[in-house]
Amino acid sequence: MNNFSSDSNFTVLGIETTCDETAASVVTLYKDGKTKLHSNIIHSQYKEHSKYGGIVPEIAARSHLNNISFIVSKAIEASDNDVNSIDAVAVSCGPGLIGGLLVGSLFGKAYALSKKIPFIPINHLEAHVLSPRLFEKIDFPYLALLVSGGHTQLLYVEDFGKIRRIGTTLDDSVGEAFDKASIILGLGWPGGKNIEIAAKMGNPDSFSLPRPMINRNNADFSLSGLKTALFRLAQKQNLTREVKSDLAASFQFAVADILEDRCKNGLSSAREINSVCKNFVVAGGVAANKVIRQRLKDLSNNKNFNIYYPPIEICTDNAAMIAWNGIEKIMKYGIKNVDNSEFEPRTRWPLDPDAQPIRNAKEAR
Ligand code: KG4
Ligand code: ZN
């Protein structure tokens, strides 16, 4: 049940192609505020990129092109919805890699045109930040920690479309740090999930790693020093299975410490902005990590915040969150006002355009 009620039901087809997942989903918001995730189809390209140790944009674009039609058809079929019951198409139009963005947005525009329904461009980052609202009633304002492969930010979400950045990474994102750590330990790519699995068998106290920015009087992050320290440490070790697990566990523990410390300041800032702010949302691929989920849950309990996560499968890239963001737009502006088929995809699309440019991690702040 959500906080919405309206005169009619709304069913939206969501499409996601910003990075290395081709995804489509059908979501309905019913008149009484109940929501239904009818289908959530994801084709991950990780096998196509894994031998390169990172995403190859040209391969990603071609793979989106090959798969999009099939994935969208599958999402509609699996939803038990007639194509004619879809009220709008919401497409992730940035930030991301231009090849995928062009495939997704052109496909979505053509679909919307052929069905005479609105095309709704969606900011992928906003979709992550709003994603738990598909499943639970979460009131604004809230603090959001967005931890994905491309971004690490603390955001004050005052209302729909009103987001202020209060912290960001000065170098790598947390997801990137996990991916690089996994490559350093020979655990493959993409790394977050592999590190989490290896860490289960390891001792988090076995190696000492730095916690950059910890105890600084702000809500910014820095991860590159931790990654470099892990690299140097790993070079000196005989990387047996046990040692890899211990290094993975020590790395994950250091990341959890960093996130806890930075979010502590973020929660205080949110309360300074609005003393009644009581909700904390954690979203993006890294939010799938169970150790980090537990650590931030404990922190919010201590600070008297309610914490919300999307379900694990909605943490990493998916189209359910894109369809849901489309529904949020319809509820805000009305179905007659959301069509924007002129919209051109954006490789950069900051959530808070007024945020100061990122400075160097070494500067005193
Ligand atoms: O949100 P996402 O799917 O893509 C972007 O929008 O960037 O996030 C992907 C990132 C990757 O860096 C991946 O390593 C990380 O999320 N990730 C995890 C876990 N699952 C995915 N990091 C830590 N633990 C996990 N279980
Ligand atoms: Zn994402």
Image (cartoon, rainbow, N blue to C red):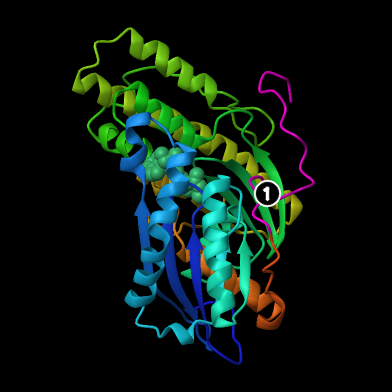
Of residues 135 and 215, the one nearer the viewer is 135
* Magenta highlight on residue 354: yes
State the residue at coordinates (59%, 52%): 144
Can you see residue 296? no
Of residues 114 and 128, the one nearer the viewer is 114
Ligand 1 quadrant assignment: top left
State the residue at coordinates (44%, 37%): 55
Other-residue count near label 1 (Cα within 10 Å), few / some / many at <14 / 14–19 / ≥20: some
The quadrant of the rendering that contains the C terminus is top right
Q: Secondary structure at mark 1?
A: loop
Tell me where residue 254 appears, x and y as whole percent: 44, 28
> Which residue is label 1 attached to?
349
Q: Which residues are magenta?
A: 344-365
State the residue at coordinates (60%, 25%): 213
State the residue at coordinates (26%, 26%): 245
Tell me where residue 151 appears, x and y as whole percent: 57, 41
Is 12 situated above or below 322?
below
